Amino acid sequence: MTRLRRPLAGLAVLLTAACSSGGDTGSSAKGSWGADSPAPARSSAGAAAPGPTPSSASPSASESASSTHRPKPSPPAGTTAPAPQPAGFPDAGNTGPRVSLKARSAGNISVRTDGAVIKGQDITGSLDIYANNVTIIDTRITSTNWWGVNLRPGFSGLRILHSTITAVPGKGPDNGGVDYAVSNMGSSSIEVGWCDISVFGNALSMGQGNLHDNYVHGLVPFRNNGGEWQHTDAVISGGGNTGQLIIRHNTLLNPVAVDRGASASVGLFADTGHVSNTVVDNNLLGGGAYALYGGGEGATGITVTDNVFSTRYHPNSGYYGPVTAWNAGGAGNVWRGNRMSDGTPVTPEPAG
């Protein structure tokens, strides 16, 4: 199967490159947030969640290196009227901040204090986390950086709860685009819950984490610095994870057209190693080339249960169908109770 191109070989390199190119303006992060410091830089688009290859210095090079990673898009033949969203899933009414917010034009902040709590803030900027056990809660982040929140390698315990993470289309560093709402560069799990996330090309980008009760919607297509359509996913994992990835009870929507870079609602891709130890349970999925990429050959320990595949954007949930790259014979792989929004059972395509 021919696949869409997407830069997905190493977010660590992508963000490390940002230091030299000015990914962080060095804005103040005083008090409980930590000391003022420069942040990483970025040289191309992707993450390890997605990102460029270590040998790549430009988006075009990293995209070329991953040119076999997604089904090749073709222009949509037409549009379909959006279907109503099934009840019981996260939406704008039950995600995001629960308190009044204090405006803070903070710029791009490096957080360096262990145990820092960021609460009740309306932040115009981004957060780069170089600390353990940081909590972001009841906060709004509006980014024009590569990411909204990024956890650096070697740090752990990040929690992002009851917050809104969004961006300004046309104002990001990737040829106007903004790439990642939340990225996890480390090998430890992070928690993202009850958050309202929109605009970014790849919303939740990580190999391990606990993603629950989030509303991901309104992803915005853009041409990246390499001049190609940036591929979009509501959740993306590049494989090779050492911990567990739990994706439970989220609304994950990808409205982007396939000829403008749509990949998936949940993309489990073996770009940096085999996909394993992943739970996809009780989510509402819709949009993308396929709504779900299931990990492909070599994927093991993947449990996909009780998900609803919405026809909001396409009659078959994704443009080409609800699911692809499912390894039915993989050890510990379970497919059960997944259905279209009208109740029709979903049968996965075999990996290939």
Image (cartoon, helix red, strand yellow):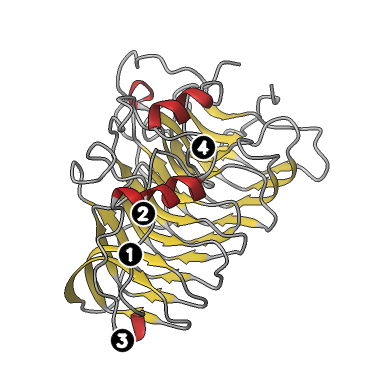
Mark 3, residue position? 31
Picture quadrant of residue 108 = bottom left
At x 29% / y 40%, what residue is drawn?
174
Q: Say which of marks 1 and 4 sits in front.
A: 1
Structural distance between the alpha carbons of marks 3 and 4: 36 Å
Instruction: Name the quadrant of the C terminus.
Output: top right
Mark 4, residue position? 8
Whether pointer 1 and pointer 3 mark residues with C-beta atoms closer than 8 Å, the reply is no
Q: Secondary structure under badge 3?
A: helix
Whether pointer 2 and pointer 1 mark residues with C-beta atoms closer than 8 Å, the reply is yes
Identity of the residue furthest to the bottom in this view: 31
Q: Secondary structure under badge 1?
A: loop
Q: Earlier in the sequence, mark 1 or mark 4?
A: 4
Three-letter code for the amino acid on which mark 2 is drawn: Cys
Using the image, tell me which numbered label, if any, was put on residue 38: 1
Q: Nearer the viewer, residue 44 or 172?
A: 44
- Residue 168 in percent (x, y) is at 20, 49
Q: Say which of marks 1 and 3 sits in front.
A: 1
Structural distance between the alpha carbons of marks 1 and 4: 25 Å
Structural distance between the alpha carbons of marks 2 and 3: 23 Å
- Residue 59 in percent (x, y) is at 39, 32
Q: Earlier in the sequence, mark 4 or mark 2?
A: 4
Q: Earlier in the sequence, mark 1 or mark 3?
A: 3
Mark 2, residue position? 19
